[in-house]
Amino acid sequence: MTDPITTYLSLGSNLGNRTNQLQHAVFALQQKAGDVERISPVYESASWGFESDNFLNICIRLKTSLTPQELLRTILEIETSMGRKRLKEDGYEPRVIDIDILYYGLETVVTENLIVPHPEIPFRRFVLRPLADIAPQFYHPILNKDTRNLLQECRDKGKLEKTTFRIFKDRQQLFSHLGFISIEGNIGAGKTTLANKISEDFNAKLVLERFADNPFLPKFYEDQPRYAFPLEMSFLADRYQQFSDDTSQYDLFKNFMVSDYDVYKSLIFAQVTLQKEEFELYRKLFNLMYREVKKPKIYVYLYQTTERLIENIKKRGRDYEQNITADYLDNINQGYFDFIRSYPGQNSLILDCTELDFVANAKDYESVLVYIQEFATNKVF
């Protein structure tokens, strides 16, 4: 193993979900090739050398201990794992992902399968523009010109536009950028469990709903018409106070916040449980409070079928929950869907977790994280 070398790579994609392809590739490079120290903004460019859909392009600075050939093998493995299939004959083609080694320190490499510096650098504006963002004064070891000069001299006039997308080196950085993620779901959906796992794995401040001591909850499940209004008013007051306190106080030792509820759930449950006149009074008070609370950057709704919810409720064995009816759970699910449709700006992600066990199965948990990652990557915050 050699001493770490600063390398520069170019990444491009014009097939499928291009932003996510770039993000997956950077995550893989961080895991397998070295430390991704800098990432350029994302640029959109016309296809170069052939007719096809536009590319998204970035450049990264990677500190690696791999030799040039080891780095190339790692890159080819990542491309193959992502579905890249190279043409046997010479020529350009659309691609899920394309990763090129631009520079390997100041070294020159000439072999049958690798030439460094990349011979096309001076001719490709879609490489030079993002490269200039992260290495403006890096000198080409053969041409003896820095990136800015090469960009000024480049004759490539192809379309190139800077986008608002961002790519991150790992999930920790991505989640930290989001600042606040809310995990929501019906009773028994697993929202608290998932919030706990994300908090532990990514160093997040955990904001959990506290309701076990609510004196109206057991009574409500026994006699809903009588105790619905005091229960919902009690929940609203508690949630508003707790949520405001917890989300307004940042923890300097944590990277972001994750909660297992959003205050809006108060209105969803109230609409299901309250009579029309009660609900109208309740909503007026709720609207005043909701304006003041912090909104999550991403709202994740864990959907599970009513049958699965009932199974989960029975497993956790809370006495006061055992009489919850399927109709009640159906109404709650519908209330959440109505909320999500009504607030498109909420950045809501619906995850069907009916067939997933993200507690016992590491692959299922990884699937959930990938869904959140892909959703976040295609949003602009």
Image: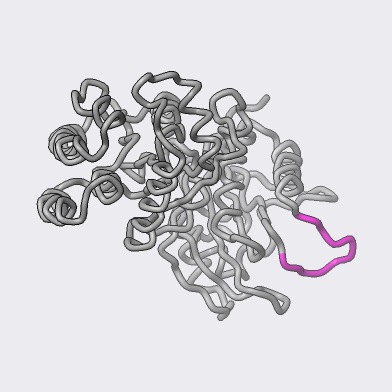
Could you tell me if residue 249 is visible in this image? no
Give the residues in magenta.
84-94
Residue sitting at 66 percent across and 64 percent down? 15
Residue 264 position, x and y percent, is: 26, 48
* Count of numbered marks: 0
Which quarter of the rendering shows the N terminus? top right
Residue 365 position, x and y percent, is: 56, 32
Observer-nearest residue: 154 or 143? 154
Q: Main secondary structure of the magenta part?
A: loop
- 85 horizontally vs 25: left or right: right
Residue sitting at 50 percent across and 46 percent down? 373
Which quarter of the rendering shows the C terminus? bottom left
**Residue 159: in magenta span:** no
Residue sitting at 73 percent across and 45 percent down? 81
Residue 283 position, x and y percent, is: 16, 54
Could you tell me if residue 358 is visible in this image? yes
Above or below, 371 against 131 in this view is above
Observer-nearest residue: 233 or 68? 233
- 356 horizontally vs 233: left or right: right
